[in-house]
Amino acid sequence: FMTESSWDEDARSATTRFITIEAGSSEATMHAATQKAYSEAELRQMLTEAGFGDIQVWPAISDNPEYGDPHRNVLTAVK
């Protein structure tokens, strides 16, 4: 299989396309996964509008340095 990734700045979304080529027939099948980037303020607003309270923001927890990025946080809330 092959992958192709792109970032859309206007939509603040990352898309990865997965392309599988069937041996013998050369038939290609494509699947895609898209991730949307939200600001902390947007996430807080969505949680509040959905009826959640006690919203807290935590730094992402991981042994992988890639996830130590200050732009990657974990939010917890109570409903």
Image (cartoon, helix red, strand yellow):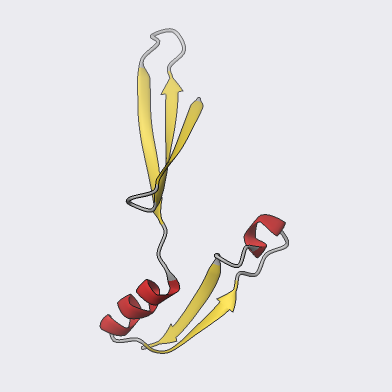
Residue 53 in percent (x, y) is at: 38, 90
Left or right, residue 71 beside residue 49: right
Relative to the observer, which residue lies in front, 12 or 77? Answer: 12
Q: Is residue 72 above or below residue 44?
A: above
Residue 67 in percent (x, y) is at: 63, 60
Q: Is residue 66 above or below residue 34?
A: below
Residue 49 in percent (x, y) is at: 26, 82
Q: Residue furthest top?
A: 24
The C terminus - image quarter:
bottom left
Residue 28 in percent (x, y) is at: 37, 19
Left or right, residue 56 beside residue 35: right
Q: Residue at x 73, y 62 (%)?
A: 63
Q: Residue furthest bottom?
A: 54
Left or right, residue 57 beside residue 8: right
Residue 78 position by quadrant: bottom left
Q: Residue at x 47, y 31 (%)?
A: 4
Residue 27 position by quadrant: top left
